[in-house]
Amino acid sequence: MTAVGAALAEARTGLRLRRRGALLTAVGIALAAAMLAAAVVVGVGLGGGFDRAARAADLPDIIVRFDPESASVVGQRIRALPDIASYSTRLELTNTRIAAGGQRRGDAVAEVMSGSGRAGYAVVAGHSPARKGSQVLVELGFAQAWHLHLGSTLYVGGLGPQRVVGFAEAPDNVGYPLAKPRYYLSRPAIEARLGAEANPRVNLAEIWLRNPRYLNEVLVQARATSFGLHDIQFATRSGVRVLLDQAAGIVIDLLVALSVIALVTASVMLAASARAEVQRRLGAIGVRRAVGASRGHIALAQGLEAMLIAVPAAALGLVAGVLAIYGADDRLLTMLNEPPPGAALVLPMAAAFVASVAIPVLGAAWPAWRAAGGSPVALLRGGELETGGRRRAGGSGRRGGLAALGARLVAARRVRLAATVVTLGLSTGFVLLMLALASELSALETDPGALGKRYQVTATMPVSAVPRARRISGIAAIAPRYEVEGADSYYLGETIDVIAYPGNHTVFEDPPLVSGRHLRGNDQAEVGVGLADALGLSPGSTLAIELSTGNELRFRVSGLVSSLDHDGRVAYIPARPLLAADPSAPYQVAIVLTPGANYGAMTTALTRIGAQFTATSGATARGVPLVDTLRTILVAIAIVDGLVCLYALIQASTLTVQERRRTVAVLRACGAGPAAVRRLLLGATLALIVPAGVVGIVLERFVFGPALSHLAVNYATLALEPTPAEVLATVAGLAAAGALAVIWVARQAARESVVAGLAAR
Amino acid sequence: MISVTVVRAEGLTKTVGTGRAARRVLDDVSLSVEADEVVAILGRSGSGKSTLLHLLGGLDAPDAGKITLAGEKLTGRSARALARIRLRHVGFVFQQFQLIEELSGAENVLMPTRLPGAPAGGARRAARLIEELGLSEVADHLPHELSGGEQQRFAFARALVNGPKLVLADEPTGSLDAENGAAVLELLRGLTGRAVVIVTHEPDAAAIADRVVHLADGRLLAGGPSLAP
């Protein structure tokens, strides 16, 4: 028999002899693998989602929107641009009426495709509308929400019933319900039914470049030659990515970061589990060494045994993890108009599988290798167990009940205690982080203050009415808030959200100042960190903004602010230069209320002077379904994480009881009943969960929270700090897991014969 | 003087192992031990001595037969009930002492007094036992810091601390030198008001017994007076 064959035979025998232990290890590996799988699915799905979607949809390099114009004129302008590979045009109609299956809406977006050129969307099922007939292609997220399937009928205002022939995803915008429902029609088909237009008009053009590196040059040329086209707006691939980030960027980045933490937690747990298993078998290793087995043979047999457990357990865990998270992840991706990762998951999942197997195998083989290097006599005596637990005894008057004894038994194995505490601490910190994240999401959803906004109400009214409104009781401050979209004069693909107030903007919006100082004077601007990162700005730099009117504004950057709005790609400027360059800049009136203001009386007074008002919302108010989906994902991860905690506790308690069979048997011989054994185990469990709770809280407070805040959004810092109630809930969860572990292991211990325990080594 | 039977075993049968490996270690064994009586069970290794001891102490259950300890029936009782009976009525002394490594000598003695349901006054009794057994100086020492004799004396104190009616000693001198062994036997002999059952294969241990019984092939062959002069 070869060396490997012999080791394999020994590994199989070991498995047969230790079925219960092997099962426990398998459960741990499966749980860790499930966690890894969940992390991989979320990470790969969301991390590369936009690029996959852009590739699948053949997203154009430039998307141009403008007031409806003759298709022939638009085509002429585009063909005059340099480096154009191809282009297509369409008419985008907003607020169209649709109905299906008893549901109806009047705000749908119809994309009337010209019927030639590249489409700019991916058909994920069925096909595009034919050039004849009443056919419609529906955005996938919308189709799923409305339960439309291929062959369904969608009633379109003005066109009547249309047969759904396909589903599409186009990453130029987020999908339904984050955005309006969108569907695609064929212009030739419509013309075939209703008659051809003499001079068809379009308002959207998609342009593909031969070499995207020349994007800026093409944009400069396009702006220069776009005469005749009105209200022209350019969006680039990177600009679209920003748009998508505005909808879900913060939370997507947070989830990707969470996945990284999950990977670390799973790895620590797997390694600790494997090492504990070898520690438990030190005696057996000693016997094998004593009868002449080589060090390599012992390590190989141990590794192979771990592999026999790990391979099926990891496979099962990965499948379970994928099944647990895939549905929620898929829903989220559909909302973002991004395809599921599909084959892109194969390699990372294979890597996760290899990691799930390799870590326990190495974790088993390496300590076995190390242990086998020691003296067989020492191993036969129980290895480090004998030396690890010794200490000087204290005074005889010291109280030490069963719980204290349990704690001492656990503390005797310091390495395992540390590994288990670290694993539980990581898991606890992770759960706390998720709770803090959920709170932050809720705050972003509902609390404008989370974005540094101090105004609670916005109103539509003439600027001239502002002085009158200022006298209304309950209004502390009121001013027009101008907001326009600009582009960086040097990098036209970088859009900037320009916000201007006539006076001190910090009264109305005060995102935290990261560096520099607030603006003073009409030639200064504060910029968001996201914009500063994109353009390489710092206090003292020059910011050049090109407005849609074609005018350019130049400012000296006075300071950088941490803003979540528009991914931090914002610039606060004084109103005067903006109004000089664009007198018709759109605005709303921002209103800060006095503390305890009578909201009803204030709004009544506002209505009386002709103002229409809305309460200010947070960043994700339009993304309630998104937040719900994210919560589902967080809950799935939290459940797996909770199971990991439970497993770690059961494993640690079981190993303690197995190693201390004789001690437990002596206690039982002296008259300890099941309650006493539970008390012993309670002490052991408390020795694990109390430090783990502290470690978890400290980790979240000082490591996870701050790190994730920066990882999640490099343009702003989120305060991911759990509330006392969340800390209490987490500690209670940990205690519940501990109680379950105590009950479970006590039951197992009670089943063992006292006599067998007394005879144990 | 009226003799009080502390433990009574009738028709005990016990088989260990299964299938072809099954072996009947006790076959229709009956034994009664009274208060103030020391009974030594002698037999070769594997004769079933320890098994009988475990059955008498409620650590194991017979396949057939019945055991009554301090007026309570042991057979057919739940694990919880047996634990309660052991706590109040049985003290074990083991060959390997079986002290808990993490606890000092005194804490080992105190341990049974801290179990739920233990009789009150355990701490006082423990202190007295430690004092009487001359262990005060080493009470705070951990087991590995104690000599074999000291360990066995602590184990002895632990067995007695809850005032059991039955003391069961399994090869109590097996791990001790002659001097310490003699001291332990002296302690066992000096117990009053209790029934003592000693399992041994050493004639010296049997010498202190009031009655010696022999186990061979699972059967109790003979009962008789002590070999002691």
Image (cartoon, coloured by chain):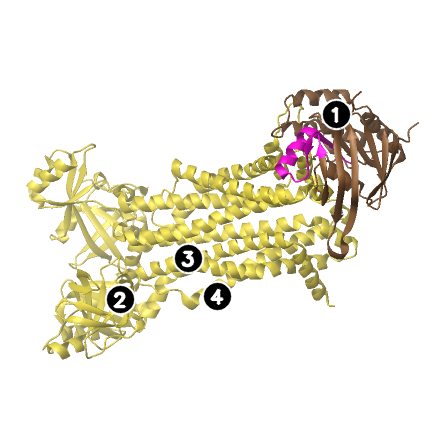
Instruction: Rate crowding at label 1 as few (under 14), some (14 to 19) or many (20 or more) other CA atoms within 10 Å.
Output: some
Where residue B43 appears, as percent x and y from the top left, is: 85, 41
- Nearer the observer: mark 3 or 4; the answer is 3
Q: Which segment is the magenta one?
A: B68-94
Q: Amino acid at mark 4?
A: Leu
Q: What distance separates the C-alpha of mark 2 from that of mark 1?
A: 84 Å
Q: Colour of chain B?
A: brown
Q: Amino acid at mark 3?
A: Ile
Instruction: Rate crowding at label 3 as few (under 14), some (14 to 19) or many (20 or more) other CA atoms within 10 Å.
Output: many
- Nearer the observer: mark 2 or 4; the answer is 2
- Nearer the observer: mark 2 or 3; the answer is 2
**Chain ID of residue with mark 4:** A
Where residue A567 appears, as percent x and y from the top left, is: 30, 52
The residue labelled by disc 3 is A325
Looking at the image, residue A175 sits to the left or right of residue A655; the answer is left
* The label number, if any, that marks residue B138 in the structure image: 1
**Chain ID of residue with mark 2:** A
